[in-house]
Image: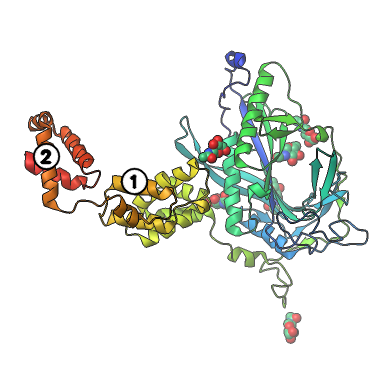
């Protein structure tokens, strides 16, 4: 199923000669998504990013003796929603287990998770990414989802190197997570990043997780191995805790290269856990994860099995408040990104890859739709401005769509000036450049100040054209000989003389009339 690993530049240059035989790389992911809920999975403590340390900790979160878990309904619904959106079978009965390990930020000494019987299983996720030699082909693939399980997050250890201390913040302890386990169906960093991005868009569309990677709401572990075609899978390494799509892709591609080189050199791969050092751009072994862990799983004695219902199994005389009804949630699922994408293509006549870009960039679709609503310009032309002008500018300046100095309203004004033929397209580009300076001027003001309006007076244009003809006799001779292409040179001259204030179509007509 997987492609042969691309022959990436070797880590050590003198090895390149050996890297002839192809290797197949295999990548599997586990994604921890923080559930979008006001309170934690088993306690009433608030969930909030960047709150003062240890300000959101209940007795249960701190594991004081005698405290008991109370399951948060909202977290269950979020997991069911996510499972349905990912084509999973929802288990009507699932179980909670204790997973034991010793760590300072885990006060109970165990995490409550769903090891034996998770809430959702056997799903799939489609994603698209650029493939091919020049990355100019959109390829759509599918990864199987093995399971989705509910579990608690741990607290955080903060290391103070100056004072050589470790401080514990339990605000995150007990926050609800959905662990999405994918089968090893992927083969490179770019592909894995696309799958995570697709998952992120789905979670955000559902509202089941805000999935903000920079806030650690989406954390990814990756299993990576390489083998010869036709042979069994190689020994895998696991890279932990990647919280950016870019680093995920880099870490995976680094591992593939590292393992390939190691094996080419006659070495072997250790079955180990590694971390990605983004400053060095490589993965390094994690010392605290050495050796095989025995998690001593056992059923959580303080939580009964989690029972879900569908419309058939729903006991009579129960209200929505008393049970979680899978069918009720299914009927209320919002549009998924793939549906939104198809709708954009249909509604505006834009290309599928453009609709993909609109959805892939946070806030870009809303920006586009706001502009389309207010302008007379054809959406197919608007998308050109959004992608070539807005997006490339934002990328250059590392800005998000929200931070754009040009609002949808300003861009609309500009496009309307162009659409009403007040300015030429090259003048529109000039206005746009001015707008990006963020000086607060409107397009109309800029046009006025810089005198960019198209010359409307036909007589004036005819005079300018005549002058250009007189000044470019050799070109005129060429045209008269039948070389029509040279006409463009004259049109360019008129544009230059008028500083882009002439309509090229009109100029062409006038020149043709005067010359032929
Ligand atoms: C999920 O798939 C596995 C393997 O194909 C199968 O044994 C199991 O019954 C499936 N579970 C559900 C709930 O469909
Ligand atoms: C679920 O399956 C359908 C049909 O195979 C597919 O069109 C859809 O893309 C899948 N959903 C996801 C999130 O991949
Ligand atoms: C990697 O593989 C191991 C062993 O099969 C499994 O326990 C672990 O959950 C996998 N991790 C990921 C990120 O897929
Ligand atoms: C690697 O180790 C994990 C547990 O530490 C185990 O589940 C897995 O089977 C091992 N894989 C290989 C290929 O040795
Ligand atoms: C449902 O509730 C109503 C009112 O509480 C009661 O009269 C009725 O007998 C109940 N029906 C069943 C099947 O329990
Ligand atoms: C944008 O970010 C990249 C890398 O993060 C950096 O190299 C570049 O200088 C930044 N550009 C600007 C305009 O800040």
Secondary structure type for disc 2: helix
Looking at the image, do the residues carrying marks 2 and 1 touch, with CB atoms under 8 Å apart?
Answer: no
Q: Quadrant of the N terminus?
A: top right
Q: If the image is split into quadrants, where does the C terminus sit?
A: top left
> What residue appears at the point 87 percent right and 62 percent down from the top-left corner?
68
Q: Nearer the viewer, residue 252 or 508?
A: 508
Q: Label 1 neighbourhood size at 10 Å, few (<14), some (14-19), many (20+)?
A: some
Instruction: Between residue 205 and residue 1, name the one nearer to us.
Output: 205
Which is more toward the observer, 235 or 488? 488
Q: Position of residue 504 (x, y in %)?
A: 21, 45
Secondary structure of residue under mark 1:
helix
Residue, disc 1: 430
What residue sits 88% from the left and 58% below the top? Answer: 301
Task: State the colouring used for the structure image.
Answer: rainbow
Q: Of all residues shown, which one is farthest toward the front?
A: 449
Identify the residue position indicated by label 2 in the image. Answer: 467
Measured Cα–Cα span from mark 2 to mark 1:
26 Å
Residue at 59% x, 66% y is 332
Residue 372 in view of the camera: yes
Instruction: Determine if residue 378 is in view.
Output: no
Residue 291 shown left or right of residue 348 in the figure? right
């Amino acid at each position: 199923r997987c492609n042969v690993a691309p022959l990436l530049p070797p880590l050590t240059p003198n090895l390149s000669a050996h890297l002839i035989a192809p290797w197949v790389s295999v990548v599997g992911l586990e994604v921890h998504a923080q559930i979008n809920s006001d309170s934690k999975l088993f306690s009433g403590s608030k969930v909030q990013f960047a709150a003062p340390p240890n300000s959101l900790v209940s007795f249960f979160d701190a594991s004081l003796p005698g405290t008991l878990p109370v399951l948060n309904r909202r977290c269950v619904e979020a997991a069911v929603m996510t499972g349905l959106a990912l084509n999973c079978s929802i288990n009507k009965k699932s179980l909670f287990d204790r997973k034991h390990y010793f760590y300072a930020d885990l006060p109970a000494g165990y995490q409550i998770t769903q090891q034996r019987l998770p809430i959702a299983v056997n799903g799939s996720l489609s994603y698209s990414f650029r493939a091919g030699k020049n990355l100019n082909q959109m390829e759509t693939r599918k990864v199987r989802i093995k399971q989705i399980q509910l579990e608690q997050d741990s607290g955080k250890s903060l290391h103070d190197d100056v004072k050589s201390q470790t401080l514990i913040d339990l605000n995150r302890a007990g926050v609800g997570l959905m662990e999405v386990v994918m089968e090893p169906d992927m083969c490179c960093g770019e592909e894995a990043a696309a799958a995570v991005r697709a998952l992120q868009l789905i979670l955000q569309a559902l509202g089941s997780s805000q999935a903000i990677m920079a806030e650690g709401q989406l954390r990814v572990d990756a299993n990576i191995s390489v083998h010869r075609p036709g042979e069994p899978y190689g020994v895998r390494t696991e890279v932990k805790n990647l919280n950016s799509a870019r680093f995920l892709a880099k870490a995976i591609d680094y591992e593939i290269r590292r393992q390939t080189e190691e094996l080419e050199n006659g070495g072997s791969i250790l079955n180990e856990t590694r971390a990605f050092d983004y400053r060095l751009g490589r993965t390094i072994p994690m010392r605290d994860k050495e050796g095989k862990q025995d998690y001593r799983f056992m059923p959580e004695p303080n939580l009964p099995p989690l029972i879900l219902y569908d419309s058939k199994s729903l006991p009579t005389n129960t209200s929505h408040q008393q049970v979680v009804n899978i069918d009720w949630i299914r009927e209320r699922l919002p549009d998924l990104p793939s549906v939104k994408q198809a709708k954009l293509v249909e509604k505006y006549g834009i290309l599928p890859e453009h609709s993909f870009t609109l959805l892939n960039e946070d806030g870009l679709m809303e920006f586009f739709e706001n502009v389309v609503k207010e302008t007379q310009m054809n959406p197919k032309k608007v998308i050109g401005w959004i992608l070539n002008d807005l997006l490339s500018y934002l990328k250059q300046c590392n800005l998000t769509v929200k931070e754009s100095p040009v609002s949808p309203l300003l861009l609309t004004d500009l496009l309307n000036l162009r659409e009403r033929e007040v300015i030429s397209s090259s003048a529109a580009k000039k206005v746009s450049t001015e707008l990006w300076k963020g000086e607060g001027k409107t397009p109309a003001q800029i046009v006025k100040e810089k005198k960019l309006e198209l010359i409307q007076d036909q007589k004036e244009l005819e005079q300018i054209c005549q002058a250009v003809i007189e000044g470019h006799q050799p070109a005129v001779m060429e045209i008269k000989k039948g070389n029509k292409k040279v006409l463009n040179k004259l049109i360019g001259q008129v544009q230059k003389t008028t500083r882009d204030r002439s309509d090229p179509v009109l100029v062409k007509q006038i020149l043709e009339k005067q010359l032929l």
